[in-house]
Image: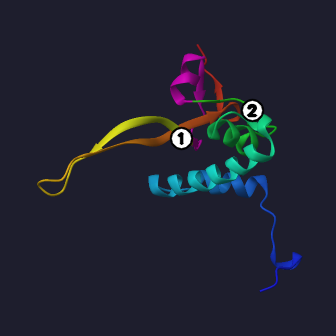
């Protein structure tokens, strides 16, 4: 099948943010992060200055915009004297790896140990406001 300009729609930043903010459930977010990670790897190959880690490239090349410049966790924003605006939806990246042990299902099998990356949730400077005292 031949691809033409007519049936190829460019993804706008607004559409991208809607995809991120409307991802429901951990599995949907993990699937998006896997796609973002593959894209980030390609960006890193083409432009080593884009970031040192997958998360840095996701933030710097995909999430950052004129509105969203600084990203922190809910807790970090609170420590800085800000609160997340009501109704704001988080950005997400891979968390630090954790050691996980999967118990063997059958007797005689060994437990399996591996590292697992969870999801870390971030808010941008465009989603917070100063806490009034």
Secondary structure beneath label 2: loop
Residue 9, percent across and down? 80, 69
Nearer to us of marks 1 and 2 is 1
Image quarter in which the C terminus is found = top right
Please say if 127 is above or below 24: above
Image quadrant where residue 16 sits: bottom right
Image quadrant where residue 70 sits: top right
First reached walking from the N terminus: tag 1 or tag 2: 2
Q: Nearer the viewer, residue 68 or 34?
A: 34
Q: Is residue 46 magenta?
A: no
Secondary structure beneath label 1: strand
Q: Say whether residue 102 is left or right of residue 62.
A: left
Q: Nearer the viewer, residue 6 or 85?
A: 6
What range of the chain is rendered magenta?
73-92
Residue occupied by mark 1: 94
Q: Nearer the viewer, residue 6 or 4?
A: 4
Residue at 61 percent of width and 35 percent of height: 123
Q: Residue furthest bottom?
A: 1
Residue occupied by mark 2: 69
Q: Look at the image and tell me whether residue 83 can be seen.
A: yes
Q: Say whether residue 117 is left or right of residue 59.
A: left
Image quarter in which the N terminus is found = bottom right
Mark 1: few, some, or many residues within 10 Å (few <14, many ≥20)?
some
User: Real-space Cα distance between discs 1 and 2?
Assistant: 19 Å
Mark 2: few, some, or many residues within 10 Å (few <14, many ≥20)?
few
Residue 42, percent across and down? 72, 51
Residue at 70 percent of width and 40 percent of height: 57
Q: Look at the image and tell me whether residue 90 can be seen.
A: no
């Amino acid at each position: 099948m031949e691809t033409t300009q007519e049936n190829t729609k460019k993804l706008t930043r607004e559409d991208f943010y809607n995809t991120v903010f409307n991802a429901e459930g951990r599995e949907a977010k993990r699937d998006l992060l896997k796609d973002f990670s593959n894209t980030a790897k390609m960006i890193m190959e083409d432009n080593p200055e884009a970031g040192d880690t997958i998360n840095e490239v996701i933030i710097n090349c995909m999430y950052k915009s004129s509105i969203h410049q600084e990203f922190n966790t809910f807790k970090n924003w609170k420590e800085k004297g800000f609160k997340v605006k009501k109704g704001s939806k988080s950005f997400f990246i891979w968390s630090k790896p954790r050691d996980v042990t999967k118990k063997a299902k059958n007797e005689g099998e060994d437990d399996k140990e591996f590292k697992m990356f969870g999801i870390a949730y971030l808010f941008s400077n465009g989603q917070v406001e100063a806490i009034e005292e």
